[in-house]
Each structure stands twice: as structure tokens, then as C-alpha cells.
Image (spheres, rainbow, N blue to C red):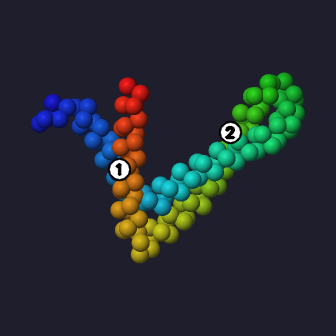
Amino acid sequence: MIGGISYLDAALIAIIAVSGLVAMYRGLTREVLSILSWVAAAGACVYFVFKYRAEAQQIAEQFHAPLLVAQVAVGGIIFLVVLIVVHLITARISDTVLDSRVGAIDRILGFLFGVARGFVLVVIPFMFY
């Protein structure tokens, strides 16, 4: 026990603080665009895997593998390519915002976002406890 709070409470507060500090360093713009880049990559993956199922079937037959294996492989490649491309674009955008006049505001809002994210990360396990 640390001066009235338990070690678990101290660890949870540390998780929230670290999340806030990391988000403050990165800025709100980079945090939000990072989440959107993962969503875009997942959306592109789902779209292309279902749209090009016939091509995945041909690849599966060529390598004597099940269709699911071909779809997962193609989906993984699409996911990684889209994620890297979108990340490169969002990094440029967020760097421009951080270097502009609103950089300090972006960092403050990023800290608030990070604290909220840390709180959610701490609360969700307790919901299932």
C-alpha cells in the first residue's frame, strides 16, 4: 500500500498517465489519424477479400491450399500495404499540424484524448471481472 492507495490503483493511475503522456507527445491529430488508418486498412481488407473471392480461389487451387488460407494471406497483404501507405500520409499531415501554430493545442487535446483512452483501457477489464 502506498500512502492510502493500493498497488493496483497506482498501476492503473500509471497506465492512464502513460497513455496521456504518449498521446500528448504524438498530438491529437496523429492519434485520431492513426485510428482512422487502422479502420481504413481493415475496411480495404474486408472489401477486397470479399470482392475478389474468385481470384483467391484460383490462388488457393494453384498452391493446393484451402480458400480460407488464401483469403487470409491476401487479406493480410492488403491490410499491411494499405496501413503503411495511409500511415505515411497521416504522418505528414500530423507533422504539419504539430509544426503549425496550433501545435500546442493539438498536444493538449492529445493529452486529454490519451487520458480518456487510458481510462477506457483500465475500465474495460473491470467490466468483465
Q: In the rendered structure, find residue 46 and report the number of the disc placed on it.
A: none
What residue would you read off at disc 2?
Answer: 76
Q: Secondary structure at mark 1?
A: helix
Q: Is residue 77 left or right of residue 104?
A: right
Q: Could you tell me how far apart the alpha carbons at marks 1 and 2 are, in whole angstroms?
A: 31 Å
Percent position (x, y) of residue 105? 38, 67
Question: Please, what is the three-letter code of the amino acid marked with disc 2?
Answer: Gly
Q: Mark 1 or mark 2: name the one nearer the start of the chain.
A: 2
Residue at numbered disc 1? 115
Where 114 falls versus 12 (above or below)? Answer: below
Residue at horizontal 64 percent and vertical 48 percent from the top: 41
Q: Is residue 28 visible?
A: yes
The residue mark sitting in front, 1 or 2, is 1
Q: Quadrant of the N terminus?
A: top left
> What residue appears at the point 28 percent right and 42 percent down from the top-left corner?
14
Amino acid type indicated by mark 1: Val
Label 2 secondary element = helix
Image quadrant where residue 58 sits = top right
